């Protein structure tokens, strides 16, 4: 339909023009409001990104200050150290590295001024209470350390332990990378802490095993005697959450670094977890996959698995930890009834 404006009276024309102008003003206001809302939304989105970025960089202001030991460990991680891949080494405060025979016990006196390696006495060159030593153990070997407070530590293959030559102050603490078993000297006035990159374990006097290899997805604490408390800081965007779990004898606590959770298992034979300190690897009803992973880590070898190999099948048995690869393959074949072939040069065992 068309409107003939010539036939519309003048007063109606003016009224119609006023309605059109009013409608145009309303449309203009709506459009301006949309633009303002878009600008506001863009502003809030940008502000949110900046805020979240700031929170990610500094997730929480309740971070506890680092101790002297933790600062030393963090500095050691950043420093390139020529790790001896063949020999156990004791690194003193002045960076002097001393080769250690696997059969020798590293033992400190109460004042920490000297350390015995077997029967050989060495000055630790300590001039203050914050003097730290480090023991590095290559793959395929292990060692035993008696700390200044009488605590005995068995350090497993591919592991390192940082500790003070003497324990001053109100706490005792050491820093572990890898796996170690501890028989902690009891002192109710001075609690003992084992610190790792991801968690802390507090004890008073106890026997336990802690496995915290950087490449593993999990951290495992197995308690044989006494009581320990596991503390794991679950880092979040807005706030960190501290997870804690007390273990009593027979319990195994496992932290999953990817899922960021802490679970406790009861009923497994904890003594078999610590069997490596006695020179053999014992297992009861463990899956073939778990067994191969542990042997692979200890001997630093690769298992090439056949297509039809069932890694979920459970086995029980034990291996002496001083076996060569051929003896290891023979023992593995005997326990699992699988065929094992060794390539010594490439350090592989094919199992099928």
Image (cartoon, rainbow, N blue to C red):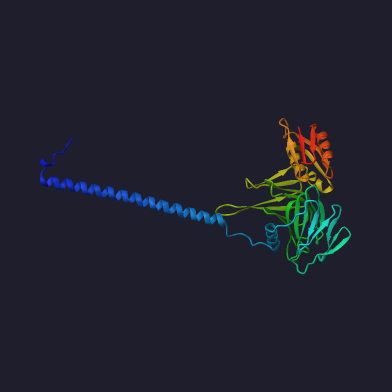
Q: Is residue 1 left or right of residue 103?
A: left
Q: Is residue 186 visible?
A: no
Residue reaching furthest bottom?
127
Residues 269 and 350: in front is: 350
Residue 306 showing in the rendered view: yes
Q: Nearer the viewer, residue 14 or 245?
A: 14
Q: Can you say whether 124 is above or below 224 in the image?
A: below
Quadrant of image for the N terminus:
top left
Q: Position of residue 253 (x, y in %)?
A: 70, 47
Q: Position of residue 92 (x, y in %)?
A: 78, 62
Reply above or below: 66 against 255.
below
Q: Which percent across, then down, holds residue 112? A: 81, 65
For the C terminus, the image quarter is top right
Q: Front-most of 200 and 82?
A: 82
Residue ranking furthest to the top: 308
Total numbered badges shown on the rendered structure: 0
The residue lying furthest to the front in this view is: 345
Is 76 placed left or right of 6 in the picture?
right
Q: Residue 326's image quarter?
A: top right
Q: What x and y, as percent, mark residue 242? A: 63, 53
| Position of residue 237 in the picture relative to residue 99 (left or right) | left
Who's the residue at 66% across and 61% down the image? 66
Instruction: In the rendered view, tell whether residue 269 sits above or below residue 229.
Output: above
């Amino acid at each position: 339909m068309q409107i003939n404006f010539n036939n519309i009276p003048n007063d109606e024309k003016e009224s119609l023009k006023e309605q059109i102008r009013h409608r145009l003003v309303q449309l203009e206001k709506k459009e301006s409001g949309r633009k303002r809302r878009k600008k506001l939304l863009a502003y809030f989105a940008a502000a949110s990104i900046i805020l979240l970025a700031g929170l990610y960089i500094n997730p929480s202001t309740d971070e506890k200050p680092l101790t002297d030991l933790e600062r030393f460990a963090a500095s050691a991680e950043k420093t390139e150290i020529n790790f001896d891949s063949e020999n156990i080494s004791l690194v003193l405060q002045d960076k002097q590295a001393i080769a250690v025979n696997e059969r020798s016990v590293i033992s400190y006196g109460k004042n920490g001024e000297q350390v015995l390696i077997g029967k050989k006495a060495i000055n630790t060159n300590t001039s203050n209470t914050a003097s730290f030593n480090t023991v590095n153990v290559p793959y395929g070997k292990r060692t035993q350390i008696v700390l200044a407070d009488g605590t005995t530590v068995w350090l497993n293959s591919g592991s390192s332990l940082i500790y003070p030559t003497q324990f001053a102050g109100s706490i005792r603490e050491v820093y572990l990378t890898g796996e170690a078993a501890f028989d902690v000297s009891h002192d109710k006035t001075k609690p003992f802490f084992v610190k790792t990159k991801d968690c802390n374990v507090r004890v008073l006097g106890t026997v336990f095993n802690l496995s915290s290899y950087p490449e593993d997805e999990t951290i495992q604490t197995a308690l044989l005697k006494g009581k320990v408390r596991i503390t794991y800081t679950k880092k979040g965007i807005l706030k960190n959450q501290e997870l804690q779990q007390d273990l009593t004898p027979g319990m195994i606590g496992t932290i999953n670094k990817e899922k960021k959770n802490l679970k406790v298992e009861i009923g497994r034979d904890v003594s078999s977890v610590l069997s490596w300190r006695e020179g053999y690897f014992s297992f009861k009803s463990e899956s073939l996959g778990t067994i191969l992973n542990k042997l692979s880590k200890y001997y630093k070898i690769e298992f090439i698995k056949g297509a039809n190999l069932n890694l979920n099948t459970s086995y029980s048995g034990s291996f002496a930890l001083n076996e060569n690869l051929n003896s290891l393959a023979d023992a593995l074949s005997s326990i699992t009834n699988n065929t094992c072939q060794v390539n010594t040069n490439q350090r592989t065992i094919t199992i099928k």
